[in-house]
Image: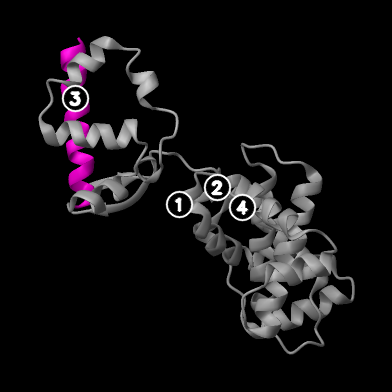
Amino acid sequence: MNKVEISGVNTAKLPLLSAEEKETLMKKIKQGDTQARQQFIHGNLRLVLSIIRRFNAKGENLDDLFQVGCIGLIKAIDNFDLSQNVQFSTYAVPMIIGEIRRYLRDNNTIRVSRSVRDLAYKVLAIKDRILTEAQREENIEEIAKELQVEKEEVIISLDAIQEPISLQEPAYSENTENLCIMDQVSDKKNNDELWTQKLTIAEAMKRLNEKEKMIINKRFFEGRTQMEVAEEIGISQAQVSRLERTAISHIKRIYK
């Protein structure tokens, strides 16, 4: 985000329009003045720049996000109604954010069918409308009824457009140690049938101390999460995580 030039635009020299200038230019735009339109776009690029900062953590190319944000800005300009007593930025921000979110969803690494994505967008639009008009969270049943689909389809469509995350992503930190998403997930496949096929590992298990054996047994034979193990034996999840890693390190050394 420390780039000065994005998509060929020197962000350090972007102009800032006053409220009066914006109003004057917008009136000219509605009369078909293309030069005023260009000036208005250029004078609102700071708004786009401020919005793409929100998406910085997603690791997307800033130039791409900036260009998509500009598309949202242009759509906002073309659809802005002067008769409504609202500031342009108030109207433009959701339009720009929406355009960027659509771009991120459409370019997700996991391919989702167009029909599912379209349904998800309709659901999100209804959610936003309910939140704005009724000041309350949406109800899945009423959304499904309005769209004339099963509520399961609504849930599936929303799940389908969620961004994937790494199992190594920190869930939270305790002291200086990160606990990962993987540590919160039960393991139904690493059962004793798979472990006992490796006699060398079974032998290595016998050389662990009692607490390490118990942790490994509950985590990999019984498929418990670290949180479940921690609650059962009365220690913190961070301690379970440390014991688990120590036990696995011992097994690796013995196995070698």
Would you place residue 51 above or below residue 204 in this image? below
Please tell me whether the stretch drawn in magenta is mainly helix, strand or loop. helix
Q: Give the label, 4 or 3, closer to the camera.
A: 3
Residue 214 is drawn in which quadrant? top left
Image coords of residue 37 (percent x, y):
78, 67
Circle 4: is it few (<14), some (14-19), or many (20+) Cα within 10 Å? many
Q: Earlier in the sequence, mark 2 or mark 3?
A: 2
Residue furthest right as drawn: 31
* Residue underneath mark 1: 1
* Residue underneath mark 2: 62
* Residue underneath mark 4: 66
The type of residue carrying mark 1 is Met
The CA distance from mark 1 to mark 3 is 40 Å
245 part of magenta stretch: yes
The type of residue carrying mark 4 is Phe
Image coords of residue 219 (percent x, y):
30, 36
**Answer yes or no: do the residues labelled 2 and 1 have beta carbons within 8 Å?**
yes
Q: Earlier in the sequence, mark 2 or mark 1?
A: 1
Residue 60 is drawn in which quadrant? top right
The CA distance from mark 2 to mark 4 is 6 Å
**What are the residue bounds of the magenta stretch?**
236-256
The CA distance from mark 4 to mark 3 is 46 Å
Q: Earlier in the sequence, mark 4 or mark 3?
A: 4
Q: Give the label, 2 or 3, closer to the camera.
A: 3
The residue shown at (16%, 33%) is 212
The type of residue carrying mark 2 is Leu
Along the line of sight, the residue nearer the viewer: 103 or 183: 183
Residue 215 in the figure: left or right of residue 111: left
The CA distance from mark 2 to mark 3 is 41 Å
Residue 244 in the figure: left or right of residue 108: left
Along the line of sight, the residue nearer the viewer: 154 or 31: 154
Residue 87 is drawn in which quadrant? bottom right
